[in-house]
Every structure is written in C-alpha cells, then in structure tokens.
Amino acid sequence: MPQRYSDAIIKYLSSRDYMPLKPRQLARQMGVGDEDYSSFRQAIKMLRDSARIVLGAKDSLMLPEISDTMVGVYRANPRGFGFILPETPNAHGDLYVPEGETGGAMSGDTVRAKVFRRGGKAGETIFHGRIIEIIRRGSNRIVGTLQRAEGSWFLLPDGKSFSAPVLVPDVGPGALVGQKVVVELTQYPEPGQLARGVVVENLGASGAIAAETESIIRAQGLPTSFDPEVLEEARLANAGFNPQQLTPGREDLTGKTIVTIDPPDARDFDDAISLEMQDGQFVLGIHIADVSHFIAAGGALDNEARLRGNSVYFPRRVIPMLPEVLSNGVCSLQENQRRFCKSAFIRYDSDGNVTGTRLAETVICSAKRLTYIEAQGIIDGKAGGYEREVVELLRRMNDLAQRIERRRRSQGMIHLDLPEVKPVFNEEGKVIDAEPDDESYTHTIIEMFMVEANEAVARTLDKRNIAFLRRIHPAPDQAASVQLASFIKVCGHKLPKNFERREIQQLLESVKGQAGSHAVNLAVLKSFRTAEYSPIRVGHFALASDQYCHFTSPIRRYADLTVHRLVEEVVRELPSAGVDMSALVKLGDSLSMSERRAEAAERELITVLVLQLLETKVGDVFDGVVTGVANFGLFAELPRYGIEGLVRMEDLGDDWWEVFPKSGEIRGERSGRKFRIGDPLAVQVASVNVPGRQLNLVLTGQPSRRKADKKGQKQSQGKAGKPSRGPRSRRRAR
C-alpha cells in the first residue's frame, strides 16, 4: 500500500541534511527494495497530487516553499517571542514569531499565522509570522505557587513556558501562601489583562520534594497510575510465568556464570553479562529481559507502554513504563532467579573486533547482583567474599571492554567529559549538597557492552532487510559546525568548519585537564543534534555507528520492545509480517517526543533541587566558566552543581561594554577587560528564583547594583546558554 511510505518520505525530506534526490535515488537511500518500488512511486504521486511535495530541478523531490499562512503548534520563549512548528512540513521549517505578534497564544496552542517575508544579507529571505487565530488551546491547566498581594490571590507559574501571573479570585478555604497548586484557566490572557483561573488540586507545600515532583509531573502531563485492565493483564502475565517450562528453541543458560551490574538503588534489572573464551576468542553474552514474552502486541498493557514510551526517573521516585509487578518482578533479572531473556552472543578477536554474532531466546539465572562500585572493587583486587567464577568474569569483562573501547575510539566514537551531578539528601529529604556521579570504569564496561549489543542487533536486522526503529544521531549541520569552529577558535584552538569525528576527538583530548575543558565539551555537545527514533538509515554520529538501535532496555523503553519482537521473528525464523513505514515513522516521532518530555522533567526537578540548595548559599563564591554572551549579560555555569546562571550587564562594572556574539566575547571599552566563552571566573550567588528556574550571579568583588530579587519574583531573562545572534551591541552599565 502506498500510504505506508508517505510519512517516511516526508520525514526524510524534512531532514536538514537532505539534498534533492530523484525518486529512484530516494528509494535507495531509504532502503526500499525493488519489489516495493512500485508502491513507493505511488506514494510519491499521492504526495505530489496533495501538494505535500513538489518536483524541483531535474525531477528531484523537495518539500514545498512556505505559503502565506501557516498552521502549527506554538512554542513560547520566556522573553516574549516564540516559534510555530508547522503541521505540514515545508522547506523553511519552524516559523519565528516576534514579541508582540503572538496574539495571546500560549505554548502548546494550535494556531494560524500570517507569514511575512523580507530580504536579508547575501540575498536570503527571512521569514517571520503574526498569529491571527488560536485554533485550539493546548492546555487549560497551569502549575505554580499561590501568592497574595494587595488583597488578591494569584498563581506564580512554575518554569518558563508561561511566565505571567494568573489571578485566582476564589482559592477556596484553607488556602495558604506558598502552596503548590494546579489552576484551571477560566479566562485566557488578553493584551493588557492577566489570565484567570480556579484551584483544582493542591499538591502540598512549595519547596517539599514531593510537591515539586508532583508539580513537574502535572506540568509535563506525565501519567501517574495504570488503568485496572492494564494492571489485571500484568498480574495475569506474572501469574502465568513458569520459568521451568521452556518452549522449544529457548536455550538453558542457568549453568553459566552471569552477573548484573547496576546502581545501588536500581530495582529493574534488564541486562546481564556472561563472557567466556572459546578457541582463543572472547564470546560476550548480553542477556536482556524478555519483556515481549509477557506483553502481547495490541493488548491493553502494550498500548499503555506505547503511550508512555519510557520510564521517568526522578530522585526518590520512578514513573515506570510497565506495572511494577513486571518491571520489578518477573521481568527483572534478579539474583538467583530463573528469568527469560533475549540474548546476543558476540565473538571478538584479540583486538576487540567483531568476528561473529548470534541471537537467541534464553533462560538465565544471575549468579550475583553487583553495584558499579562493588564490581570496580573486584576489578581493583578487592575480591574477598566473592566466588572465584564471578571474580574471573569481572576481570575478563574489564579486559574486553578496554579492547572494545580502543577499537571504537579508533573508529571515531566521541566521548564527552561532562560529569553528571546528583543531589545529596538528608534524612528529611532536603538537598544539602551536590556531588559528581560515580565514574567507576565499570560504567564504561556496561556502556561498551550495551552499545555493542545494540549495534549487533541493528546489523542483523538490516542484513535481513527488516524495517525497524533505529536510534539515529545525524552529524551536526553546516550552521552548527561553523558556529562550533568559530567558538573553538575564540578559545584558542583549531577546528575546521567541515570537521570529521576524529578532529573532534583530537580537540577534546587536547583540552583534557585544562581550565577551558568544560566549556569546549559543552560547546561540542550543543553543536550535536538530538538523537531520535526513526526507521530511516542515518546512523549514529557520536558512536561512529552505521547501524544502531535500542535493544538493551525493554523494561523502560518501548522502542526496545519493538526490536525484541523482530528479534523473535529472526530467532524463530518466522516469516516477516511486513512493516507500515509510515506507522513506524509516527511511532518513532511519538517515542522521541516521550523521551524528550521525560528528560525535560528529570532535568527540571534536578534544577529545582539545586536552586533550592543555592538559596541557602546567597553571597557564597563559586568557580564558574563563561558559557554564553548576550546583549544583557553573560552566562556562567557552576560545574560543581551543573547549573547555569546570569551575570547581568549592569553587574559587570562601570564601563562601556561591547558584545561580540560571533566571537563569544564581551569587552569593556575603557578598562579593556574581556570576558570570553570558556573563560574561568569566580562568581557570587546574588539571588535565586526557584519558580522561574533562574540563578543570578555577580562577579566576585563586584556587588550587585540591583536590590536582591524578592523570593519568587519573575524577571526578564534570556534562555540559558543561548548567545545573541544579532549584530554586536554596546551598552553602558552603571
């Protein structure tokens, strides 16, 4: 059917890297076989007839130019402007909406905008829009903190997507200042008028970790409970599990030494490792929980997992993709318990090169549940109390992982030196400090093995010409490459505008241990595109992998579950049921969006907790590094806490300050003092705005000329880490 290719074609043509191709060339790029080319051609004709694609020069396929109006979803920026994500893809992409042209739209609203054009430098056309109609509101609920001023109650919204206060005429009995609540809007904001709403849910005292977690869950629209039919299906799957009853073809590995290595607080163990020597070669076994055995495609449990997309991990709370009776029960590879797995056996020579791959359905019994620190201790010689087989396994794992890592780095795999920061809690649940996450080499061991398994499965499916959800990570586009090269030059290093992975590796190695290392690593990360799920053959840039998918975490990622079902077809030599490429594209887009939502929620809670900690440290001095410049100040990150703050222009000192966005520099005309991206500097915490997710800093020895912000008061501030793209600006600060 032609329809099964339609969305896949649009997805491919929407890529920023797409170069116009003829139909036959496009089919080859998308992996369409000769037997399916007729349907593919029909899909192209249908898309042309509906004006969703057009023919360009030499019959090449392209998206249409932007029209005079656009319908799409509006995404607001706290500084007043925003962007419209078009419903129908076009050659231009998202449409910029300036401040004052938003028509009262809120983030998530579906809107119609009039498109305006004007000429720019080098003859290019610059587009912007004015919202002329709000077709559909995206949400009518806002989360925030109750406040009272001049006899009126109002809600101070959390986050940056909606920054204006909301009047709450009737808060109900027992309302208290500082309560975290959910407000349903009864009147949307109009020019010159605030929105109005009513309290529909009380989440607890603002600042408490439970209330802050709940507020982010509500704001992101995350599910919190399972429907009864989903739970019942999970219970039946659990009750019907008999680990002793093996279907024909499932291999019994319970006699082999197999271990799991996870964080100390992990509950869902979805991967286990075995490693043997055969004929002078390593045989690595990566054993992944066989979630597909328990979840029938199309059932209530499967539909719920597809809708959730993934688990969400907060400090002290998890929102699981699957009910705990499965995720923490029969699917979890617990110590001394027989568990079903999908296994990838990969053979390696002495240089860590893959010489063979075999997939299988298995049953295992984990000999030991280890934490990363415990496993590292065994490798380092602290093996007392552990069985000899476990100790030998860990040492072989360490040996093989280092060989694989050397090989992957020689192939171009990029490793960024950006340690994650985790909050430290006291017994009352308050954050009292933050510390770098554990960086034992055992993390790298598991990472290398999981990457190898994901790649091996992707290679196997691709060789059989099976369409599947790949994990794709395109290379940086031209604009990002040029911007990164310019930044690196400012930092005193060299990087070609058309760089290769190896040149990024060399750059990162050259700055290792230097003062500007953090800024360079952060800049490289920002130049990368976001990885996503798609059936398109793109590859994974950062991992230097041509074939890659997610296979190793089906307990917490639905994409992995879809791959497991295809592995089952391969292992059992079942005829392929065929895949609707358009449906697969839509599923990939949905799972990518769910992943981004989960990551945003997880990051936001960490930000809130760290800001709460820094509220107690106003006036304290910390080491920082300049990460961005703008016409209103400079951004500096505190590496100790992994958070970014703003030093406003008026707090830089009495001078004429010139901003040079292209070179990432602010320069004082009289003093000659310079601040460049990557420069280390000492900063003092001036004020903290937890609801607004803002940290305000001043330079050491340069007291703020502004009064400290009242707690919770909103301020106008640019988006963290995003330098101004306009012409250089010049401001007098006093």
Image: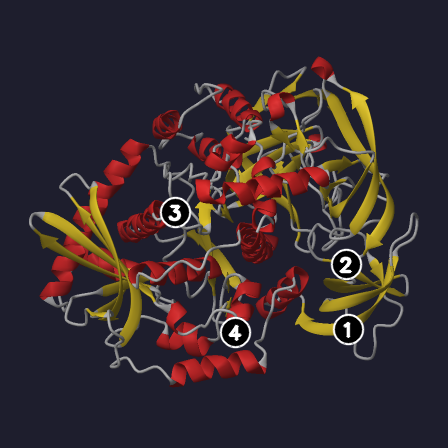
Q: How far apart are marks 1 and 2 (CA)?
A: 15 Å
The C terminus appears in which quarter of the rendering? top right
Q: Using the image, determine if residue 497 lies above or below residue 113.
A: above
Image coordinates of residue 691 in percent, x first then y, are 69, 56
Q: Can residue 383 be seen in this view?
A: no
In the image, residue 174 sits, relative to residue 458, either above or below, namely below
Is 217 positioned to the left or the right of 621 in the image? right
Disc 1 secondary structure class: strand
- Give, as a three-letter code, the residue at label 3: Asn
Query: Disc 1 or disc 2, which is closer to the eye?
Result: 1
Mark linked to residue 156: 2
Pointer 3: residues within 10 angstroms few (<14), some, or many (20+)?
Answer: few
Which one is closest to the eye, mark 1 or mark 4? 4
What residue is pinned by disc 3?
465
Identify the residue shown where x is 65% and y is 63%. Answer: 221
- Residue 183: x and y in percent read 78, 67
- Of callouts 2 and 3, the N-terminal one: 2
Task: Name the residue located 83 percent from the left edge and 41 percent from the top edge.
Answer: 113
Q: What residue does disc 1 label?
A: 200
- Residue placed most toward the observer, 439 or 291: 291
Q: Which of the two discs, 2 and 3, sits closer to the camera?
A: 3
Query: Which residue is identified by label 4?
Result: 299
- For the residues labelled 3 and 1, the Cα–Cα distance comes to 52 Å
| Local crowd size for mark 4, using a 10 Å CA cut-off: few (<14), some (14–19), many (≥20) | few
Q: Do the residues labelled 1 and 4 touch (CB within 8 Å)?
A: no
Q: Residue 64 carries which label?
A: none
Are the residues flagged by discs 1 and 2 in contact, CB closer than 8 Å?
no
